Image (cartoon, rainbow, N blue to C red):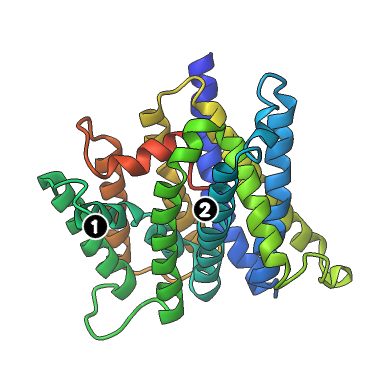
Amino acid sequence: MNRKKGLFLVLTGALFWGIGGTVSKKLFQYGIDVDWLVTTRLLVAGFLLLIVQFVRKEERTQIFAVWKTKKAAISLITFGLLGMLAVQYTYMASIKHGNAAVATLLQYLAPVMIIIYSVFRRQATITKRDVLTISLALVGCFFLLTNGSVSQLSVPLLAIVWGFLSDIALAFYTLYAVPLLKQYHSLVVVGWSMIIGGLALSFVHPPWQMDFKHLTIETYLYLIFVIIFGTMIAFWFYIESLQSLSPKESSLLGNIEPLAAVLTTVFWLKEPFGFFQWIGTACIITMMLLIALNKKSSITDHQYAYESKNSQTLG
């Protein structure tokens, strides 16, 4: 029963992440501002995650413990601004200018950035598996962005730029948070980092500056889904799944997120998606599976070691 519960939680969480990106695109089509959505999403979801942590009596002391040491507090603020806020904003901007499918797949190229960074810093040597991983990423990226044409892009340039910035931000997000996660529960780290990022962006677009009277019921429902289900519950479910599944299993099953983003983008929003873009999608998903199924230690393990505790919360 526990295993079935774990499978349900991780699959549901991943589906919520993937669908959440597509629903965000729908909100942008309705005129919702990117700055406002990211601000509101971070503040509400972060607050709710800390409430979840508070309910757990044996772990509630960690909520404020992270602020008691100067080093941890500075790291948390840095992570909130350069990690969480950067990832969320660039991802949403990529969706706005393009679509959730491409934005999600581009963000999932972060392991390649980690490989490049690790080799550049001489922290590891590149392996044959890493070469295959990079090759799949490059081929997948080419087909995804060009649909097989060498003369034109199939995706708006701004969406690609924001997508690659999201990729870089996620690589930083993944690596920088590791020391914090060794000391504090992931709900605490992510909850506070969301609030920090949301508060910072509030100076650009305060969450109360919105013409709520002109929002339709449909828009409110989409907002609830993105903020509650696509962010807070998605992350919570993923963390809970680790109680009955191994980190590798949760990471592997979590790869359904980009597939959910692609399918909802194509069949719900009716966004055009060419034959070669499907091939590109298959290459990138294969790359992710290759990393998740790897039994030997490699420099790409940093990505999934972190995700086993603290998924991307991207979608």
Q: Nearer the viewer, residue 148 or 270?
A: 148
Residue sitting farthest toward the left: 128
Give the Cα distance between marks 1 and 2.
Answer: 22 Å
Q: Position of residue 38 (x, y in %)?
A: 65, 62
Q: Quick check: 80 above or below 237?
A: below
Q: Nearer the viewer, residue 76 or 265?
A: 76
Q: Quick check: 155 above or below 56?
A: below
Mark 2 Cα-neighbour bin, 10 Å: few <14, some 14–19, many ≥20: many
Mark 1, secondary structure of its residue: helix
Q: Position of residue 197 (x, y in %)?
A: 63, 58
Q: Nearer the viewer, residue 104 or 59?
A: 59
Residue sitting farthest toward the bottom: 151
Q: Quick check: 294 above or below 197?
A: above
Mark 2, secondary structure of its residue: loop
Q: Which residue is mark 1?
A: 116
* Mark drawn on residue 314: 2
